[in-house]
Amino acid sequence: MRLQRSSSTVREWVEIARSQTVELVNVTAMPSPRSRLAMLGHPQLVDFGGGGPGATQHGRQFSCFRALRGYSPIVVDGSPKQKERFSRAWVVAAAAAANFTYEIVADDERGVDMTVHSHEHTLDFQLKATSNPDIQDDCLVHDLDIRTYDLLRSQQRSGYGVLAVIVVADDTAAWHVMDQRGTSLTRSAYYLPLFGMPSTSNTATIRLRVPMSNLLTANAMKLMMDAQAARWAS
């Protein structure tokens, strides 16, 4: 939690800090903030910086203070909708790197969340994102509803049906990190072609095993597009 404001007292910040981790930035306090905090019974909040542009003769500016004892970051897991939106980034990145175009499908009536296009052929992606993957024998285990499975495996459809499972971090703050050295998306995306898969007698869901070696890279996009092209060439 990050807060920024000026105040003549630190009492309200201390009350917040007693209940959760807080980082304060550019807070102007009255003289002797250390002794003030000790008077408030919270002496562990003592990480103050020096004066700065905001310092006055009646107060001094400290850059930040944070709870030093029992400090633990607040972990915020994304909602299903947020994970769904973030999962598109993996398809966009791989498609663009492979020099393919892409579209987001507003209505997944046909079991498709995104499509990727070469000049002549199309990949149809169903996207699933999770921060709690079920990993068994180097495979991601995912239960897909039968309707979507049947739609994507059908050999009557024009596009090449693919399931993509995106494993995200359990803290949204780690999903997208950027600095001068580069950009990081956490964690990884995997794919499983469903086109031509066998039918099932299941009525609700089917358990699929996605090999963790099936990383959704630009090269994987090209290989799947080649498979789609070969389908029409035969």
Image: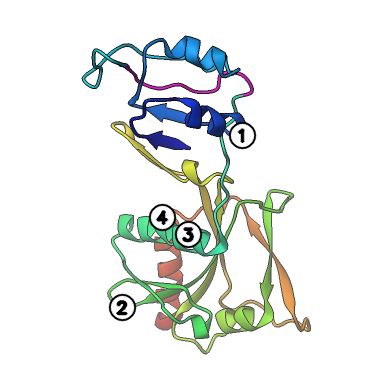
Measure the C-alpha gap from mark 4 to mark 3.
18 Å
Q: Secondary structure at mark 4?
A: helix
Which residue carries the number 2 mark? 120
Residue topped by disc 1:
19
**Which of the pair 117/129 is nearer the observer?**
129
Discs 4/3, front: 3
What's the residue type where badge 4 is placed? Asn
Mark 2 or 1, closer to the camera: 1
Q: Quarter of the image holding residue 180?
A: top left
Label 2 packing within 10 angstroms: few (<14), some (14-19), many (20+): few
Marked residue nearer the N-terminal end (3 or 2): 3
The x and y percentages for residue 185 are: 44, 45
Q: Are marks 4 and 3 in contact (CB under 8 Å)?
A: no
SS under mark 3: helix
Instruction: Look at the image and give the residue range highlighted in magenta.
Output: 60-70
- CB contact under 8 Å: marks 2 and 1: no
What residue is disc 3 on? Answer: 87
Kindly indicate whether the residue at mark 1 contacts the one at mark 4 (C-beta within 8 angstroms).
no
Q: Which residue is mark 4?
A: 219
The residue under the point 61% across, 19% down is 69
Which x, y percent locates residue 16? 54, 34
Residue 231 lies left or right of residue 165; in this view the side is left
